[in-house]
């Protein structure tokens, strides 16, 4: 098995080979779907009792009530205080950068007044309550907690409820510390589909939320998919992706490690390099071969690179940008001179990293923009998680008496055209006209 796939845009089979590499369908495992459907129905029916039962079964945590599974705020603060100084400083620095960036996304209420006194506008309000799923145990990601919780608090969400599984009662101290830093309001030691169900439907001890965000395993993803519509969700994310456009002048080791940084997530992750210099592609492949044995996740890297990775020889950087737009990657690095020039040609990407020093890993942790990004080509129509995901817009309409004379006639005419008589009459009642004209099409 070769280390990584090599493609050339000049080859007749390039397009078909690329499509094969890109093909990923988030297929729904029938057995997982059945289990999740049963759990959600049980939680919706039995509430706390079902949550406690599944927590005992799956996490091996015994509790007589959901209240016993609440993680006190004092424990979060204690975890923060107990962190090594460098870890605490890194978490706090990342949180501050994330907060400052997202404060610029906050929308505000606005109105304008027309000449006749009619006032139109938009009112911005935060969601009331948000549920944040945080993986527990070994797969704990405090960085994801910061990325999900901070935009919600910046948006003004009054209550952010964190759920996190604690297998065998083990709580991750960095996750608790991150909760203290991010301003989480409540933390409950539950996980899995049962936690998603409790957040979506509510139980006697857990108020239902308006939106559920945060990563999880296949059961969590299936549960989020099923409760969508009852509540909002952030997205159903696919495997991690990185696409690098390089002019062949960045140190090959840097690019090799950038590709590793996403391929190491799991065997389905995807890492692709586009470059017009064949010798440079050879150099990157050699660097990968040399560096791979030094990586703790070598086995995952080898599978990911062999199955879904690619080094692609392109005619020029313009062609590279066109291919990038077609792929619509989660992460796009433009490792070139004058990267802004090429970024101007990019229409579809979750996050764009410009310049040789902009490694994707910095974006994952502390650059400031959100690392919750669209995958599997959904960057063609969706955006990174942000403050706007935790705010709602309500239209404001205040029609003046004078405005009603003009707008009422327009509305009545259109309503009669659609055969909706009550709509028309409702508008006509506001007209300052001969009462005998009421009930007739405007202008009749």
Image: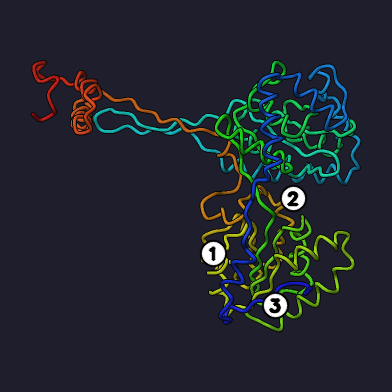
Cα distance in 3D space between marks 3 and 1: 24 Å
The answer to which of 421 and 115 lies nearer the viewer is: 421
Where residue 249 sits, quadrant-wise, is bottom right
The answer to which of 137 and 408 lies nearer the viewer is: 137
The mark closer to the camera, 3 or 1, is 1
The crowding category of the residue bearing disc 1, from other C-alpha atoms within 10 Å (few below 14, some 14 to 19, many at least 20), is some
Where residue 39 sits, quadrant-wise, is top right
Which label's residue is closer to the chain start, 1 or 2? 1
Q: Residue furthest bottom?
A: 279
Cα distance in 3D space between marks 2 and 3: 26 Å
Residue 150 appearing in the image: no
Q: Are marks 1 and 2 in contact (CB under 8 Å)?
A: no
Q: Position of residue 271 (x, y in %)?
A: 70, 64
The residue under the point 82% across, 25% down is 71
The crowding category of the residue bearing disc 2, from other C-alpha atoms within 10 Å (few below 14, some 14 to 19, many at least 20), is many
Secondary structure under tag 1 reads helix
Q: Position of residue 159 (x, y in %)?
A: 66, 26
Disc number for residue 365: 2
Q: How is the image coloured?
A: rainbow
Disc number for residue 249: 3
The residue under the point 76% across, 58% down is 267
The crowding category of the residue bearing disc 3, from other C-alpha atoms within 10 Å (few below 14, some 14 to 19, many at least 20), is few
Q: Is residue 46 left or right of 407 when viewed as pictured?
A: right
Q: Are marks 2 and 3 in contact (CB under 8 Å)?
A: no
Q: Quadrant of the N terminus?
A: bottom right
The residue under the point 61% across, 51% down is 374
Report how many numbered discs are placed on residues in the image: 3
The answer to which of 366 and 135 lies nearer the viewer is: 135
Where is mark 1, residue-wise?
326
Q: Position of residue 444 (x, y in %)?
A: 8, 29
């Amino acid at each position: 098995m070769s280390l990584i796939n090599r493609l050339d845009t000049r080859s007749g089979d390039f397009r078909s080979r690329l499509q094969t590499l890109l093909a990923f369908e988030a297929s729904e495992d029938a057995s997982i779907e059945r289990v999740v459907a049963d759990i959600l129905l049980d939680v919706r029916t039995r509430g706390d009792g079902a949550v406690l039962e599944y927590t005992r079964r799956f996490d091996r945590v015994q509790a007589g009530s959901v209240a016993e599974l609440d993680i006190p705020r004092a424990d979060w603060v204690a975890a923060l205080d107990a962190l090594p100084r460098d870890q605490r400083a890194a978490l706090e620095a990342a949180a501050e950068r994330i907060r400052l960036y997202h404060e610029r996304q906050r929308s505000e209420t606005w109105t304008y007044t027309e000449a006749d006194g009619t006032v139109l506008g938009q009112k911005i309000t935060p969601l009331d309550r948000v549920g944040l799923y945080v993986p527990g145990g070994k797969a704990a990601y405090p960085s994801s907690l910061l990325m999900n919780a901070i935009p919600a608090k910046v948006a003004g969400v009054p209550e952010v409820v964190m759920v996190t599984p604690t297998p065998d009662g083990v709580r991750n101290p960095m996750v608790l510390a991150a909760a203290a830093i991010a301003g989480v309001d409540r933390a409950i030691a539950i996980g899995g589909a049962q936690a998603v169900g409790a957040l979506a439907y509510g139980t006697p001890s857990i108020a239902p939320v308006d939106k559920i965000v945060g990563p999880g395993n296949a059961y969590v993803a299936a549960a989020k998919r099923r409760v969508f519509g009852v509540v909002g969700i952030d997205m159903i994310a696919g495997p991690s992706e990185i696409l690098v456009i390089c002019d062949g002048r960045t140190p090959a080791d840097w690019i090799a490690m950038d590709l590793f940084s996403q391929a190491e997530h799991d065997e389905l992750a995807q890492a692709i390099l586009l470059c017009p210099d064949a010798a440079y592609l050879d150099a990157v492949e050699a660097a990968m071969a040399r560096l791979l044995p030094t990586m703790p996740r070598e086995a995952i890297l080898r599978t990911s690179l062999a199955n879904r990775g690619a080094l692609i020889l392109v005619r020029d950087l313009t062609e590279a940008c066109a291919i990038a737009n077609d792929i619509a990657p989660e992460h796009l690095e433009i490792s070139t001179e004058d990267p802004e020039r090429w970024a101007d040609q990019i229409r579809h990407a979750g996050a764009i990293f410009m310049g040789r020093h902009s490694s994707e890993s910095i974006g994952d942790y502390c650059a400031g923009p959100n690392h919750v990004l669209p995958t599997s080509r959904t960057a063609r129509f969706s955006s990174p998680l942000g403050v706007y995901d935790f705010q709602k817009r309500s239209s404001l309409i205040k029609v003046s008496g004078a405005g009603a004379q003009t707008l009422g006639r327009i509305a009545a005419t259109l309503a009669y055209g659609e055969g909706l008589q009550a709509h028309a009459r409702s508008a006509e009642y506001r007209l300052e006209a001969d009462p005998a004209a009421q009930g007739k099409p405007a202008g009749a």
